[in-house]
Image (cartoon, grey):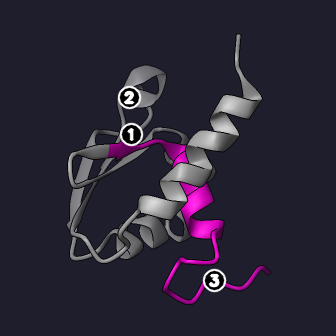
Amino acid sequence: MWDVTRTVKHHIELMEHFDFKEPAELFVGGGRMSGRFPMFYRRFATGAEAIRYAIELQSSEKLMATVVEVDAARFDSAAIRCLYDCDAYPLPRQSAS
């Protein structure tokens, strides 16, 4: 069973220790969606840039199959969204249309 309290605590800890300036790798694909689009890999100079790419430049379907890796730690779509929404995120966010 999914434990909401545990998940929220995990994301709070994640935001407190995430270094947006570290280099990052972004992986998209695999699982059920692998037939819809091929596996994709891209390296970014900073974690902030990888997060921006994942949130602002991908479809929500691709975001669900995205993992960002920073300093050997992997972050799924929910963690990527939390990092993008947190106050510490250093880049300007895309304005809602």
Which is nearer the N-term, disc 1 or disc 3? 1
Q: How many marks?
A: 3
Confirm whether the magenta stretch covers residue 6: no
Residue 59 shows up from this direction: no
**Residue 92 place in picture, x, y as percent:** 56, 89
Task: Tell whether label 1 touches label 2 (CB within 8 Å).
Answer: yes
Task: Tell whether label 2 touches label 3 (CB within 8 Å).
Answer: no
Which is nearer the N-term, disc 3 or disc 2? 2
Amino acid type indicated by mark 3: Gln
Disc 1/disc 3 C-alpha distance (Å):
25 Å
**Residue 95 place in picture, x, y as percent:** 71, 85
60 on left or right of 31:
right
User: Which residue is under mark 1?
Assistant: 37
For the point 30% across and 39% down, the residue is 38
Q: Magenta stretch: give its range.
A: 74-97
Q: Is residue 48 above or below residue 61?
A: below
Q: Is residue 87 above or below residue 66?
A: below
Q: For the N terminus, which image quadrant?
A: top right
Q: Is residue 82 above or below residue 38?
A: below
